[in-house]
Amino acid sequence: MMLIQRESVCDLWEEIMPLLEAHWAEIATWPDIPLDVDMAFYDALEEADALRVFTARDRCKLVGYAAYIVRNHLHYQ
């Protein structure tokens, strides 16, 4: 059974990195530049209530995710 839920990125790093690395390997424009995720910035966004991460789990195993930065649109201060 698939479970979709909101989770904290701070709690997900170990689980999410293999998926993030696989995604990067598929879409990297410059694969010779290594992936170097700014985890501290993601954590700070979450601390500021400006990040939402939703996960997809199959029998508790992480199988997908979506991360959104939440803020006012730059056209509308």
Image (cartoon, grey):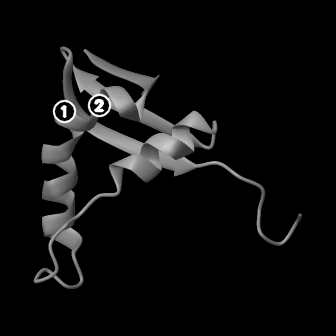
Where residue 35 appears, as percent x and y from the top left, is 19, 66
Specify the quadrant that holds the N terminus: top left
Q: Which mark is residue 15?
A: 1
Q: Mark 1–mark 2 contact, CB under 8 Å?
A: yes
Q: Name the amino acid, label 1.
A: Glu
Where residue 33 appears, as percent x and y from the top left, is 16, 80
Quarter assignment of residue 14:
top left
- In the image, residue 17 sits, relative to residue 63, either above or below, namely below
- In the image, residue 39 sits, relative to residue 16, either above or below, namely below
Residue at 18% over, 14% down: 59
Residue at 10% over, 83% down: 32
Q: Secondary structure at mark 1?
A: helix
Quarter assignment of residue 31:
bottom left
- In the image, residue 17 sits, relative to residue 31, either above or below, namely above
State the residue in front, 63 or 40: 40
Residue at 44% over, 33% down: 54
State the residue in front, 46 or 76: 46
Residue receiving disc 2? 12
Residue at 37% over, 31% down: 10
Q: Secondary structure at mark 2?
A: loop
Q: Name the amino acid, label 2.
A: Leu
